[in-house]
Image: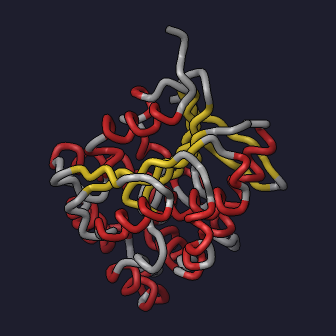
Amino acid sequence: MMERERTVDGEPIRWLEHGAGPPVVLVHGIPTSPRLWRHVVPLVRGRCLALEMRGYGAGIPDGEGRDLGLAAQAQRLLRWLDALEIEAPVLVGHDLGGGVAQIAAVHAPGRFAGLVLTNAVCYDSWPIPSVKAMQRTAPVLRHLPEVGLYPSFVQLLHRGHDDRRRALESIGVHWQHYVTHGAARGLMRQVRALDVRDTLAVADRLPTLGLPARVVWGEADRFQKVGYGRRLAADLGTDLRPIRGGRHFTPEDHPGAIAEAVNELLPAGPP
């Protein structure tokens, strides 16, 4: 995947890009980065653009003094699409990125060709208890050294994977950004910005979207329960696609299931 960057309204926006053809925009969650999609994009038959949310990944330092809430991230996404003149992408979101995708789709449904959500925050499903605890103790945690947060980070990633090998790989991939840019301050900026009102504000409009949609969910997810996935699928007029035994980080553990759902929403290629 190639690293790209563009300044939009004075803010640097970064993404990873791979492939050619119809556009696909992928949005990660917490505590990950665009590299979350590294096993998915080679399986997608389109031009994949994995967006880095403001204040995440290599852009953790850029989050200082910025609104990192989901509604603000959705507006950045829409401005970025305008700047790149990307028309009718399939929008894909995981975790917080799934919430960003819902908000962007509700505010500009005509901009997208389809919507794929996997183990996404939605309705009142979040923040999860561990994140709420971090929000309460943020003033103290932000002063911890990286070594103090690393065990909790490792535990979170292991709890969210059903593939141990991918969990170990994921820890190395995603911790790198935090340890490079200040784990405590970066993570605390991220969690302080999380507000369930962002998804509740668009919940009643999901059934009216009218977009082709796919909802793929790890049934054993301990963070975003499968019941929320069923509700989301029903509101979007589709059937839930469960991954038996799958946990939270489906793009890393089950990339084929995610890519299959995306490919189904892309225009048919030449015979």
Image location of residue 95, percent across then percent down: 43, 61
**Residue positioned most to the right:** 9
**Which quadrant of the view contains residue 184?**
bottom left
- Res. 236 in view: yes
Q: In this view, does 22 lie to the left or right of 27?
A: right
Tell me which residue sits at (33%, 83%) in the image.
Answer: 129
**Which quadrant of the view contains residue 87?**
top right
Image location of residue 123, percent across then percent down: 48, 75
Image location of residue 241, percent across then percent down: 31, 50
Placement of 203 over or under 41, stated as above or below: below
- Res. 179 in view: no
**Which quadrant of the view contains residue 141?**
bottom left
Q: Is residue 267 left or right of residue 6?
A: left
Tell me which residue sits at (62%, 69%) in the image.
Answer: 205
Q: Is residue 102 left or right of residue 126?
A: right
Placement of 135 over or under 221, stated as above or below: below
Tell me which residue sits at (44%, 67%) in the image.
Answer: 121
Image location of residue 188, percent across then percent down: 49, 76
